[in-house]
């Protein structure tokens, strides 16, 4: 697909199979060949991040997050610097959010995940939740930057990077864009939207935020160098006795968080947007004021009492 503005044309490329979702790159470049070479570089990086941040699959010759989990309580695993970066960022966010965003939550999310995937529509037992919650301490994650290794000291603990992996990959892509022929671009990495630069005529990109999966827009934002990420209770869930149990777990209650039904974040760093969308979904509006100010976030909340917004889109 392409269209022309001055000496730049816009092109788009969509590919499947990464992060279990759809990835689209749209951007302006002098020629189609320029766009295609940039797209190949962008998708190669997405593919690499997909392999490194995977918690379910092994890849020949690759030490990924699954390798770290498989070696919990056994030995430290030497990993790529992108994993060190992702986990260092995630531990920092865990501290900043008082544990609302905790990538060491794997034991607990696995209990819910297994029930969601089972055919018999049952809830996890209290015992299973309690046992799992005894193994979600971020202190069990040891990152050795000098030796590029990661070690989980608790054999029953595991990493779940689902809340941050796409956003962190998007941050790495954003960092590489200035070295490509693209003058401006939008990346949609499974709902993590990154805007880069303005269009050749100086116009910002337009990004719509949907209300749940209703097809209705909450708003359309005009953005330059901003990322948009949404966490919602409608994205992955199952139902037991008419009650919806979704995929974002409050580490304190051990149950899906019920403080709101959707949180969208706009800020300049896609990794921060992804981490904060999950964290603020768990923490709820009343506990978010400090983080919104500290990180200059714009937040749209959808709850049982309607739609609210906090912060400012361009306040950075
Ligand atoms: P997101 O869609 O970015 O909000 O991420 C949701 C995913 O993050 C879930 O599917 C789990 O894999 C994982 N997750 C759930 N609860 C938490 C939590 N409290 N902290 C960190 N990760 C979580
Ligand atoms: Mg997230």
Image (spheres, rainbow, N blue to C red):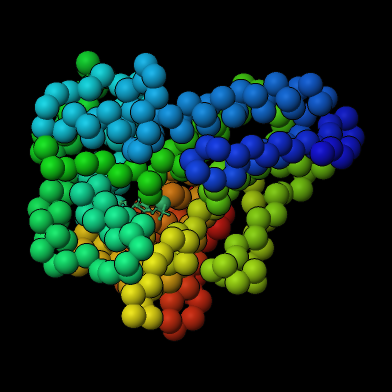
Q: How many marks?
A: 0
Which of the image's four quarters has the N terminus?
A: top right
- The quarter holding residue 290 reads bottom left
Using the image, determine if residue 15 lies above or below residue 304.
Answer: above
Residue farthest bottom in this picture? 305
x 29%, y 61%: residue: 115
Q: Nearer the viewer, residue 64 or 112?
A: 112
Q: Nearer the viewer, residue 293 or 23?
A: 23
Q: Nearer the viewer, residue 206 or 71?
A: 71
Q: Position of residue 207 (x, y in %)?
A: 65, 55
x 33%, y 59%: residue: 118
Q: Position of residue 216 (x, y in %)?
A: 65, 71
- The quarter holding residue 98 reads bottom left
x 71%, y 36%: residue: 13
Answer whether residue 269 is visible to the viewer in this image: no
Q: Nearer the viewer, residue 126 or 79?
A: 126
Q: Position of residue 86 (x, y in %)?
A: 35, 34
Answer whether residue 73 is visible to the viewer in this image: yes
In screen coordinates, is 156 left or right of 95? left
Q: Position of residue 126 (x, y in %)?
A: 14, 67
x 59%, y 29%: residue: 43
């Amino acid at each position: 697909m392409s269209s022309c503005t001055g000496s730049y044309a816009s092109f788009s490329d969509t590919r499947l199979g990464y992060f279990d979702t759809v990835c689209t790159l749209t951007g302006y470049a002098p020629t189609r060949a320029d766009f295609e070479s940039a797209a190949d570089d962008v998708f190669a990086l997405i593919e690499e991040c997909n392999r490194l941040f995977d918690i379910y699959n092994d890849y020949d010759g690759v030490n990924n997050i699954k390798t770290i989990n498989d070696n919990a309580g056994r030995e430290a695993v030497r990993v790529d610097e992108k994993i060190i970066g992702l986990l260092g960022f995630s531990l920092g966010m865990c501290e900043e959010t008082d544990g609302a965003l905790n990538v060491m939550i794997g034991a607990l999310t696995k209990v819910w995940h297994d029930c969601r995937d089972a055919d018999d529509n049952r809830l996890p037992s209290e015992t299973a939740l309690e046992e799992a919650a005894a193994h979600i301490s971020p202190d069990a994650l040891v990152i050795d930057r000098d030796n590029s290794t990661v070690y989980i000291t608790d054999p029953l603990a595991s990493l779940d990077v689902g809340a941050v992996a796409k956003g962190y990959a998007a941050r790495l892509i954003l960092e590489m864009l200035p070295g490509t022929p693209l003058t401006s671009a939008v990346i949609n990495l499974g709902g993590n939207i990154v805007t880069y630069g303005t269009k050749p005529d100086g116009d910002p990109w337009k990004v719509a935020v949907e209300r749940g999966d209703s097809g209705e827009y909450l708003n359309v934002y005009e953005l330059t160098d901003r990322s948009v990420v949404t966490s919602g209770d409608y994205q992955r869930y199952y139902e037991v006795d008419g009650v919806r149990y979704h995929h974002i777990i409050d580490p304190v209650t051990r149950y899906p968080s019920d403080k709101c039904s959707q949180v969208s974040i706009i800020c300049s760093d896609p990794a921060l947007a992804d981490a904060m969308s999950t964290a603020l979904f768990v923490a709820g509006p009343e506990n978010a004021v400090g983080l919104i100010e500290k990180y200059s976030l714009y937040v749209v909340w959808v709850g049982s009492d309607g739609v609210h917004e906090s912060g400012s889109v361009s306040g950075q």
